[in-house]
Image: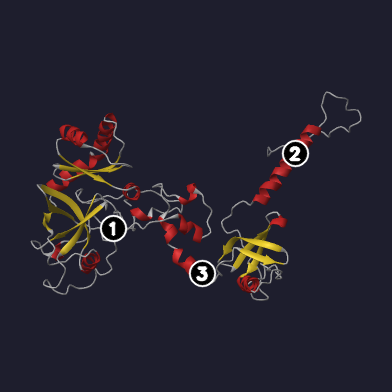
């Protein structure tokens, strides 16, 4: 994200990655796309893509504009441009241009020729940037006041973000709500309070988390606020396929829904589960009826439990389970089952366990326990020390301390 310590030379360019406004890396912007074709030479003015992608509010919203009035070579990625909007103008920065925009339009089923795009008016002037920075600085103040007004009207909605145009004529309020909200009175109050055109847009919980951003449990920035653009549904079947414990706290993201990253490895788990036999919930063996508890796709084991063992889990290999199922299908109920040796399963002979070395200098629990034991011994010795007021005739006198002089003559 943005680097607050960056300083620009002219004082007008946006700060961020010390590139003085021409941020080719886009590190100060959300949902950034690296333009890996930017160093290729231009094919020609008639063949180059004349549509550019402009992002607003640090990548929270992206739109496409045509720049037929300006030579596309003069507009670089990261430059601020003034674009045409209904009834005014707005300021955004170029997030993508060139052939990658053509690929994005194809992905969105938009035609470069037939689709009507609004125009890029000009490169942003100092006056445009001053107006843009003014309204950007007032967004938090406007958001607090708008939440206060919505609370007075007792509306069951949550305002997440406000986006104000650079000319100050229109504002978009993003909100989340469980049910339908009648905000006709709210719009009148906002128009009277803020003196500009109001537009309300309802978003979902995942979109709200994407706009607000944050750090996930993995220690990285949220996927939805950095690169994830489409939100696929995540249900509890994904958790069951991956043999995860149903823990709402660990499986839910900051949006309160199941984490999107649960879908990342789902295909791998589904492919691995195809090797396991079906209808293997129960096995009838010589030891009794075994019930399936879990599947370990990494080791290729299926863990069963017998009632007489009081919940003790016993691992069986996939081949062994298939053999027992074939015997059960033939009517043989006392099939023999052998416990798999987990330590030697799928491991070549002669292999040794890897020895891990403490390379970071962390204190082990063993050393802490030893220090605690020594501390307890010190306490016990302190408690056993004789009282100086008691009779000390039976004890040998302590020798007088030696005094060593440090003065040099």
In x, y percent, where is residue 288? 71, 63
The answer to whether 361 is drawn above or below residue 400 in the figure is: below
Q: Earlier in the sequence, mark 2 or mark 1?
A: 1
Given residues 310 and 147, the one toward you in this image is 310
Tell me if residue 402 can be seen.
no
State the mark number for residue 26: 1
- Please say if 66 is above or below 175: below
User: Quick one: which residue is furthest to the top in this view?
Assistant: 389
Instruction: Find residue 351 and report its horizontal and vertical position in percent.
Output: 66, 73
The quarter holding residue 185 reads top left
In this rendering, the answer to whether 379 lies above or below 51 is above
Residue that appears at 19% across and 49% down: 12
> Rounded to the nearest whole Å, what is the CA distance between mark 3 and mark 1?
39 Å
Q: Is residue 377 left or right of residue 64?
A: right
Q: Quadrant of the C terminus?
A: top right
Specify whether 393 is left or right of 387. Answer: right
Badge number at residue 272:
3
Q: Residues within 10 Å of mark 1 (few under 14, many from 20)?
A: many
The nearer-to-camera label among 3 and 1 is 3
Where is mark 2, residue-wise? 378
Q: Foreground: 16 or 72?
A: 72
- Which tag, 3 or 1, sits closer to the chain's start? 1
Q: Is residue 81 visible?
A: yes
Residue 389 occupies quadrant: top right
Asked which secondary structure carries label 2, the reply is: helix
Q: Are marks 3 and 1 in contact (CB under 8 Å)?
A: no
């Amino acid at each position: 994200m943005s680097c607050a310590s960056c300083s620009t030379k002219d004082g007008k360019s946006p700060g961020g990655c010390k590139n003085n406004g021409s941020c080719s890396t886009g590190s100060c912007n959300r949902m950034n796309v690296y333009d890996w074709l930017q160093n290729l030479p231009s094919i020609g003015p008639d063949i180059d893509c004349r549509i550019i992608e402009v992002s607003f509010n640090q990548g929270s919203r992206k739109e496409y504009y045509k720049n037929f009035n300006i030579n596309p070579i003069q507009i670089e990625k990261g430059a601020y441009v003034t674009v045409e909007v209904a009834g005014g103008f707005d300021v955004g920065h170029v997030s993508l241009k060139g052939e990658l925009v053509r690929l994005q339009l194809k992905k969105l089923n938009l035609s470069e020729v037939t689709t009507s795009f609004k125009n890029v008016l000009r490169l942003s002037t100092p006056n445009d940037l001053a107006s843009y920075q003014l309204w950007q600085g007032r967004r938090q103040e406007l958001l607090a006041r708008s939440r206060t007004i919505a609370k007075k009207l007792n509306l069951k909605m949550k305002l997440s973000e406000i986006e104000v145009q650079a000319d100050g004529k229109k504002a978009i309020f993003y909100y989340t709500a469980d049910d339908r909200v009648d905000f006709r009175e709210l719009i009148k109050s906002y128009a009277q309070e803020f003196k500009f055109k109001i537009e309300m847009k309802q978003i979902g919980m995942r979109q709200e988390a994407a706009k607000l951003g944050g750090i996930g449990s993995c220690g990285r920035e949220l996927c939805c606020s950095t690169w994830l653009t489409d939100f696929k549904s995540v249900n509890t079947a994904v958790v069951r396929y991956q043999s995860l414990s149903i823990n709402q706290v660990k499986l839910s993201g900051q949006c309160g829904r199941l984490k999107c990253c649960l879908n990342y490895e789902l295909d791998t788990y589904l492919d691995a589960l195809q090797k396991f036999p079906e209808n293997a919930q129960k096995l009838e063996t010589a030891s009794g009826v075994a019930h399936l508890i879990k599947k370990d796709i990494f080791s290729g084991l299926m863990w069963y439990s017998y009632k007489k063992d009081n919940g003790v889990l016993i691992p069986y290999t996939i081949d062994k389970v298939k053999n027992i199922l074939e015997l059960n299908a033939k009517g043989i109920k006392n099939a023999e089952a052998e416990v798999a040796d987990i330590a030697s399963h799928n491991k070549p002979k002669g292999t040794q366990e890897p020895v891990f070395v403490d390379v970071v200098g962390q204190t082990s629990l063993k050393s802490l326990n030893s220090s605690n034991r020594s501390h307890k011994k010190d306490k016990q010795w302190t408690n056993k020390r004789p009282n100086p007021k008691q009779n000390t005739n039976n004890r040998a006198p302590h020798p007088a301390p030696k005094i060593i002089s440090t003065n040099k003559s």
